Image: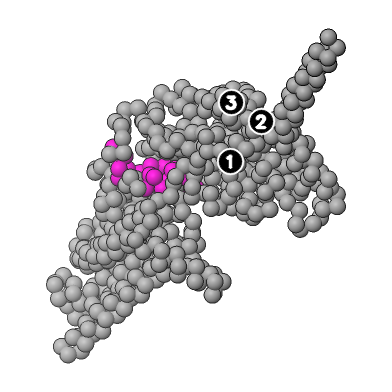
Amino acid sequence: MKQVLRAALTALAVLCLGVLSAAAADDTDSPDRALADLLAGARAKIPTQCDSPDAGTLVQVLCSGTLRVGVRGNYPLFSTRVAETEERIGYDTDVGRAIAAKLGVEPEWIYVRAATRISTLAEGGADVVIATMGHNTRRDGEARFIRPHYYSSETIIVGPRDLEIANWDDVRERRVCSTIGNYANSHLVTQGVRLMLFEDAARLPEALNENVCVLAAHDDSFMAYYLGEPAFGDRFERKFGFDQVPWGMAVAQTGTDDFALALELISEIMHRDGEFLALARENGIFTSFLENQQVLWQSPACATVAALTDPACVLPALDATPPATRFAPEVENSVAWMKDNIGFAPELPMLTSVPAFELFMDGIVNSLILVVGALAATLAFSLIFGFFAALPFRASRVVAWGIITTLQSSPVILTLVVAAAVANTIFTYSPAVALGSAIVALGLMNGCNAGQAIGEAADSLRAEGRYGTGFSAALYWAAVRRSLTQLLSFLVNAAKGTPIASFTGAPELLSALTDITSFAAGRVTTYTMVLVFYIAVVFLVVWACERVRAKLEQREARA
């Protein structure tokens, strides 16, 4: 009996030891235990390594007692500031507070825009960015994203309820408002959409209300707030959506190994325990993604540290890499050679991706059309205005000088805007209409000045008595020849003024490169290329004008 009892006790002891060992093993592989060990190791380096340049971000955060969190300035339900108290509210800021609490530090809010989220990290301006940033493959090369992701959304097209928009065919060639740095911009431009870009997403609903934009594209999470307001929702609606993308917190690419791991473990725990879900419900945002994530991270397959690298548990980044041009490898090799041998290399997205290259080439062609058109319109309007200004009849001269004075008194950009508005009232918006209105506006502005010079030359010729006191074709062409210098200078001025047409929607090179830099890096390079292009164009126009002047002078000398 004693032997049986002893055997039973032994078996029970072995069973208990096995359970305890399994529990210890499970605890070792749990995110809670891994996070505690990671933080303990980092705190052990305080204060000896607080001033060390080799200290990682995690140690620096714990040393300072502050977590610098990059958040959006005005993104309803996610990150806004209460004017009376200066308090930050919203889902993103609540997530930042929860993470700071788990690290045992205080959050410090760093304001970022869509266009500055990644650059703020690269420049050391923030420790982590939690700012409604979609995680796509293109951004993987610019920042380190934390997974599991803390939210997900898609981009939606929003427009007036009475406007029939069902798919991309209905949006093509329309002007759509978006924000600089929005990952969806690359998709939009590949669909033939013309972009109008804003720094702040809060400007999009305003632009719709003010009829600056007919359509706007942004995250459904952002637009949901405005569509829920009666004043806005009664006028506008969601048309369709695209590119479902997970949102990721992001940290700098270097010096952040331990910090990134800590954030990943915290994210896993917050999904498993429903903390993300609870914060989302408190802020009134969509929760279906977070509900599914909680179920996933509570499952045995995803309840361990190893799950952080398991494709079955963590979502992939949205594949936002545009198709490469056939000569992209040669361009990339040249850029790499310049960087290795010169220490500097330009970024050339317009030569490495198909959407950017197509925009670039279209921009060059449209710019040349715009320049040639502006020159022709300037010449035509100068001759027309000059004709009426040269007439000896008081009525015609008063009308001509009145129009000339009005145009001279109007700012160039305002004249372009008015011309575009009139053209869009008469015709449906299209790139051709935008170019045509810009050509007319530039021709009017410069042609009236040259026409004034012709009129004044005609008056001086009449005063000299060489062509009588009336009007004749001989007098008119003599006045044109006498004002040739002014005419040629305004032709040059018309060529120099063409880039400003981009502000009214003309799809010339500056507009195309603005679209390219809305989804690709290399802003300095692209705008430098605009400068070089227009310098070359103006130089060519000046050279051609000088050749024309020389030939006319030679012909007049022979006569």
Which residue is identified by label 1? 309
Q: Is residue 172 left or right of residue 4?
A: left
Q: Residues within 10 Å of mark 2 (few under 14, many from 20)?
A: many
Residue located 75% across and 41% down the image: 38
Q: Can you say whether 254 is above or below 178 in the image?
A: below
Name the element at disc 2: helix
Which residue is identified by label 2? 269
Marks 2 and 1, the one that precedes in the sequence: 2
Where residue 552 appears, x then y in whole percent?
A: 21, 82
Name the element at disc 1: helix
Whether residues under marks 2 and 3 lie with C-beta atoms below 8 angstroms apart, the answer is: no
Outermost residue, bottom side: 558
Where residue 319 appears, x then y in whole percent?
A: 44, 45
Whether residues under marks 1 and 3 lie with C-beta atoms below 8 angstroms apart, the answer is: no
Which residues are drawn in magenta?
Answer: 170-189
The three-letter code of the residue at mark 3 reads Ser
Q: Can you say whether 538 is above or below 354 in the image?
A: below
Residue located 29% across and 72% down the image: 487
Where residue 256 appears, x then y in whole percent?
A: 67, 49
Which residue is identified by label 3? 299
